[in-house]
Structures are given as structure tokens and as C-alpha cells.
Image (cartoon, helix red, strand yellow):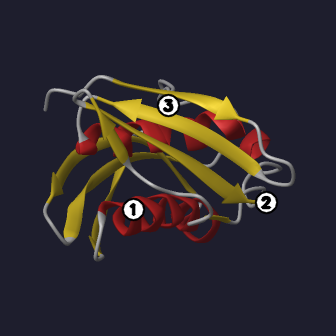
Amino acid sequence: MIHPDFSWEPAPHTADLAIKISASSEVGLFHAGLAGLLGLLDFDTEIKNEETPGTYQFSLHGNEIEDLLVDFLTESIYIMEVHSLIPIRIKSIQLNVNSAEGELETRVVRDFDRPEVGHIKAATYHDLEVIEIDGKFEARIVFDT
């Protein structure tokens, strides 16, 4: 799969954590959102020699791209907390009007990751709006901490 151009950066927020994401496509926003989530938590996305990468299938349904993005990020947080897996990258994603499905490449939570797992509770809808400007998609995502 060719990865779309995307970027993320921390965004100011008074109480919680936030990121600003941008991408050349809506699919790219998912890549940027995951990279931003992992970046806020300072998780290493490299697989060590002794580790075997895993996979995690996801299937989400929503009314708008914003719903799918929040659900995707919340699902990523869920697998960290419940399954002790870090979703290090999107292996594949199929985005449709009301659904997103795909596969994440994962690694096991390492001992030094544990203090950060659970630090972010969920992605929120607070001020979330995906906008397109001159063929570039942008959004600001606030995470509940």
C-alpha cells in the first residue's frame, strides 16, 4: 500500500491533549491521527529483533468521516489498554462512506510503555471537524486524559 502524505503536530488545549492533523486524502487523516496519538504518548514504532509484529483487524461504522476517525482512534486506545498491543501502523485501510475497515500492525506493550498506557482515555468530538482546503484535509483532535 502506498502511504498518503500526512503530518501531525501537537495543538494547544487548556485541559486535555490535542493534535492538528493534515493529509492529502481522508485515508491519510487516519495515518496522521494514529501517528499523532503514538507521538503524544512517545511510543516507539519500531519492531525489535526479538519481537514478532502482530496484526489487529478493525471494522467501524459511522455517519461521517469524523465518526470514523474518533472511533478508529478510540479503538487504537482500546487495544493498548485491553489487549496490551501498540498499533504501530496501518497496514491496510478501506474507507467507504459509512465505514472503515482494515488491519493494524501491532507490537506488544513493553514494560517502559506501561506508565503511558491509559494516559489517554479516548478521542473526543470536541471541536472536531474535517475540512478540505485546496485538496488538503485537516482536522484538530482532542483526547480526553
Decide which of 121, 29 is in the foreground and name it. 29
Residue hosting label 3: 50
**Label of residue 104 in the image:** none
Query: Residue at left 37%, top 49%?
Result: 54
Does dot 3 land on a helix, a strand or a loop? loop
Q: In the shown orientation, is residue 96 left or right of residue 6? A: left
Tag 1 near tag 3, CB within 8 Å: no
Residue under circle 1? Answer: 66
Q: Nearer the viewer, mark 3 or mark 2?
A: 2
- Please identify the quarter of the rendering in which residue 29 is found: top left
Q: Position of residue 57 (x, y in %)?
A: 28, 63
Label 2 vs label 1, nearer the camera: 1
Q: Badge 2 is on which residue?
A: 145
Q: Is residue 4 visible?
A: yes
Dot 1 amino acid type: Glu
Q: Earlier in the sequence, mark 1 or mark 3?
A: 3
Kindly state the secondary structure of the residue where label 2 is placed.
Answer: loop
Give how far apart the Cα atoms at labels 1 and 3 are. Answer: 37 Å
